Amino acid sequence: MTKQKKNAWAIFWAILAMLYFFLPMLGTFIFSLRMKRGVLSFMAYQSVLADSHFLESFRYSATMGIITVTISVLLLLPTVYWIYIKAPWMRAAMDIITILPFVVPVIVLVFGLIRTFGRPPFQLTLTAFGTDILMTAGYVIITMPYMYRAIDVGMRSVDVRTLTEAAQSLGSNWLQVLTQVILPNLRIAVLSGALICFATVMGELILGDFLVRPALGSYMAGVGRSKAYEPAALAIISYGLTWLCLGLIQYFSRGRQDGQLTGR
Amino acid sequence: MKNKQLNRKSGKDPSRWKSLIGLLPFFFFIAFFLVMPSITLFSGAFQDMDGQFTLANFSFLQNTFALKSYLTSIWVSLITSVIGGAFGFFVAYATTSGRAPRWMSTILTTFSGLAANFGGVPLAFAFIATLGRTGFITALLKGICLNGPDGAAICPFNPYDHGFNLYSVVGLILAYTYFQFPLMVLTITPALEGLKKEWVEASTNLGSSSAQYWRYVALPVLLPSLLGATILLFGNAFGAYATAQALTGGSIYLVTIMIGQQIRGDVLGNPNEGYALAFGMVIIMSITIFLYVMLQRKTARWIKS
């Protein structure tokens, strides 16, 4: 009897949670189909996809996402590798350092970036290119906790030391070890980090908005102020994109028990 | 760095600093794009307009406008971390060790990963499309009749005529909960899975009821993880900006919204007070993350064993 009562209690919460997950999604989807009076249609989606600003900002954010991922991997993969090989005593400290981006909320970070790099000696905000450098740096900082953790977890599951020694005894230099031995072994971990990183950049509002670059987040915020049905369509598209990124992670890391660290 | 041969024996090298050379690019990056911007703000927070040291910028705490923004932010973060935390805990409880049907658990775990990462502007849109003035559920409710407190049927039932408003703190809490409770599910599940079957068996054998097991065994063991996870949720909500901005158009004064307006147009009329406002946020976030890390370490000790 106790067992049954327990299960009913569990099912109650499970159903409540599913309602919380699905009702807003369902509501948004149905709402997005109602642009044309009286019938359900994909008009809102057509309207979004026909908007050249949408495509531009989508392309811009996707490009920024790829650049961010590249720089993040270039910066963090050798760093984590170095720690495992040369300075394992730094690991505890690195855990703290890489969580620091959570301590500085994005709005505070962008405030600091604007005040620091908006004036000499490191003035970057004068040109679009300079601002993009600042944007990328900001994105790399914001996504660092995820990327670092993903690489760290991956590195922990392979014996980097033995791999390195084996490769070195076969005559590899450190660059070859890193690109031809370590990276292939960590591809799933790096890919997971990259996808989370990419999804974060695609949905990010603050950096693009305050540094006045045509990012997807700012575009969406603008649409939200002026239109009724398109925002719902955008929310669904955005859902789909996040879904795709996370689905890919789960697909690639099947059967692995990687810890996940999230936060907004 | 190029001709650094990786050598196991270098571990014996007495100068630890040499082993940090490879970390220089990383530290340089952090120093340039995280530490330096923070120092700009922090030093600004303690300077007056002429660059002299002062504590006057923190008098914003007497400015009801700024103080209220802090109180609103803390209030919203507290409420959503407690509601989201409790909700998430029960959901995690349901999904672990087969208490709810397997397919439900699978869906919930998968969607927790999705929803915890889903926030910002699209989340606000989703709630506007669902519960906004012309939203899907609002429209549904308008189509049905509800019995009012005096027994008379209210037709149509428009929640907006009965005190509900999505574009308010209530709406904000509803929207935040969408990413808060899944984050709780993700963070608390490992701890729940760490509860050993033997403990239930042992306490049952000793004659304790299910309630006694939870009261005297499970909850005390889970307490650090529960606290830690709830604190993480607090920080998660405290730093959020985009959802609130897109949902309410900045009409609810959270600290993040205030800072946003300060960046745009110096609403406080004193740039240094803006720095002080940001400094305060970092202090609160530091305490939050510090507590989280401490509690997490305490948890890690027994989860691993």
Image (cartoon, coloured by chain):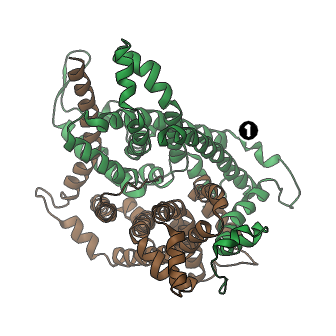
Q: Where in the figure is residue B58, as x and y percent of width and height?
A: 76, 45
Residue B194 visible to the viewer: yes
Q: Is residue B185 left or right of residue B232?
A: left
Please, which residue is most extreme toward the top here? B207
For disc 1, the chain is B
Toward the right, the furthest residue is B52
Q: Residue at x 43, y 39 (%)?
A: B173
**Chain A drawn colour:** brown
Task: Decide: is A127 above or below B24.
Answer: below
Task: Tell me if I can see residue B139 in this picture.
Answer: no
**Residue A45's spot in the image, x, y percent?**
23, 67
Q: Amino acid at mark 1?
A: Gln
Where in the figure is residue B278, as x and y percent of width and height? 67, 52
Picture layout, residue A19 above or below residue B116? above
Report which quarter residue B152 is drawn in. Answer: top left
Residue at image point 25% right, 47% down:
B107
Rendering coords of residue B154 (x, y %) = 20, 26
Q: Is residue B62 left or right of residue B300?
A: right
How dense is the environment of label 1, judged by Cα within 10 Å: few (below 14), some, or many (20 and up)? few
Q: State the hue of chain B.
A: green
The residue that mark 1 highlights is: B62
Q: Nearer the viewer, residue B157 or B70?
A: B70
Question: Which residue: 54% across, 83% down?
Answer: A169
Q: Nearer the viewer, residue B274 or B16?
A: B16
- In the image shown, does B177 or B231 lie closer to the viewer? B231
Decide: is B215 above or below A34: above
User: Which quadrant of the figure has residue B122?
Assistant: bottom left
SS category of the residue bearing label 1: loop
